[in-house]
Amino acid sequence: MKRALSYNLLMLSLLLVSCLNYQQKEINTNKSINSNEIQQSGIQLGACQAGLTNTDAEYRLMDDLGVEWLRNVFAWSRLEPKPGVWNFEYYDKFMETAENYGKKVLIVLAYDVFWLYTEEEPKRNITPERRDAFLEYVKTVAKRYGSRAAGFEIWNEPNTPLFWKGSDEDFFELTRLTTALLKEIQPDKPVAVGSIFYHPIMSGKSYLKKMIRHGLLENADAVSLHPYGLSLSASAKRVVQADKLIKESGYDKEIWITEIGFTTGGSYPNKTSVPGQAVAVIHAITQLSAAGADLISWFKLLDGQMPEDVVKGISSEEFFGLAYPDYSLKPSGISYMPLAKTLAGTVFVPDDLNLDGISTGILQNFRYEGADGSTILIFWTKRGTIDVKITEFSGTVSVTNLITGDQKEISGTRSIKIGTDPVLIQGIPVNEDSVIGVHKIK
């Protein structure tokens, strides 16, 4: 997702439409999301542009953070710099290191090569006469790396003029042929289609409808969305609507959020403060998983600049990271870490708490269930603090402040003070039918 001036103008348009900074936008409770529209099979978390240095230090960072999925473009231009001349050295090393650390690699197939075009022709425009060359690239990647990959994603944000300059029909046919080829070579590997910049200003919903009409979901396993915007509540609702549209069209496909993020520098309108990005990570993972996302990949792992090196005019692209280039954590990394390590493989459970004397207009609440029988609760208030007592847990529960990373064990009456800092509470219910009670202490 290497933006530039054109993306900056796009984000400026988003600002003009929304007219709100992220930190000023009130986050709605997950109760506003219809539970009948949600289908979860286990949450997976990852990061974009991760592992690119191929260093042990970067992979140790990912282990510390709990990053399991690595979403990266296996760039055609890097692999085949000249017609028929292939260079596998970089991606061979990348896959080897990722395997050594047990990471799941999501291979993005994109974009093009300069030798496809004359100087006058627009790039990123795979016309029918160029399809065979692209499909040869797809076949080469699938045969060499596909058995070791976790899955494939076709292209990146084709509904934006920065990443696709051809017709929709040409892209849809390219996607259809690519999906069929991948399923022929690696039939057991999931394929995600779409990679849509899913916002009204980019006609995200209309683009998804056109994809469905052209039959692109027939052989796909997932639809990938990038629900960028200035309000995560609005983004989550759009994901719910996308999931509903897909199911009403007769398809039962997973929803993969292969990019979501907020920058802490530059001039993009979704710029937030460094502490604000930490809050955004928490809100993104909770609200998007509640909206039905099976995979959530944060854009991106590392900042491109250390704070002391920042000068005026540096692109916002340099500041989406969970950590700095020296691998020290940003506050967003501190927030991401317990979420990734705790929520991986869990299932979101809507509307299954007994809130006693507590208004959902005040308390944000999310419940998840783990395969080990544990229950995970994430709470925060929109304003002020409340004292609550948690019931129907067996033994002690752990309580983690998702902003500071501080953790403690609580037993007995389990009285907990909930404030605007989100907290993660994990424990084992008394039995599998227990309804966890959250009681306000007068």
Image (cartoon, rainbow, N blue to C red):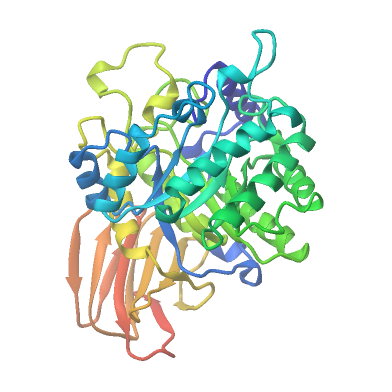
Q: Place residue 246 in its image quadrant.
A: bottom right
Q: Place residue 365 in its image quadrant.
A: bottom left
- Left or right of 18 in this view: 365: left
Q: Is residue 37 above or below residue 324?
A: below
Q: Tell me what residue is drawn at x 34 percent, y 86 percent.
A: 392
| Rendering coords of residue 136 (x, y %) | 58, 37
- Left or right of 244 in this view: 163: left
Q: Is residue 292 above or below residue 127?
A: below
- Left or right of 419 in this view: 405: left
Quarter holding the C terminus is: bottom left
Q: Is residue 392 above or below residue 247?
A: below
Q: Is residue 118 above or below residue 139?
A: above
Q: Nearer the viewer, residue 223 or 260?
A: 223
Q: Tell me what residue is drawn at x 20 percent, y 46 percent.
A: 60
Q: Tell me what residue is drawn at x 32 percent, y 12 percent.
A: 311
Can residue 404 be seen? no
Can residue 309 be seen? yes
| Rendering coords of residue 433 (x, y %) | 44, 90
Q: Residue furthest front?
A: 84
| Rendering coords of residue 380 (x, y %) | 39, 59
- Left or right of 401 in this view: 343: right
| Rendering coords of residue 105 (x, y %) | 40, 49
Q: How many marks?
A: 0
Q: Tell me what residue is drawn at x 38 percent, y 34 percent.
A: 88
Q: Residue furthest top?
A: 119
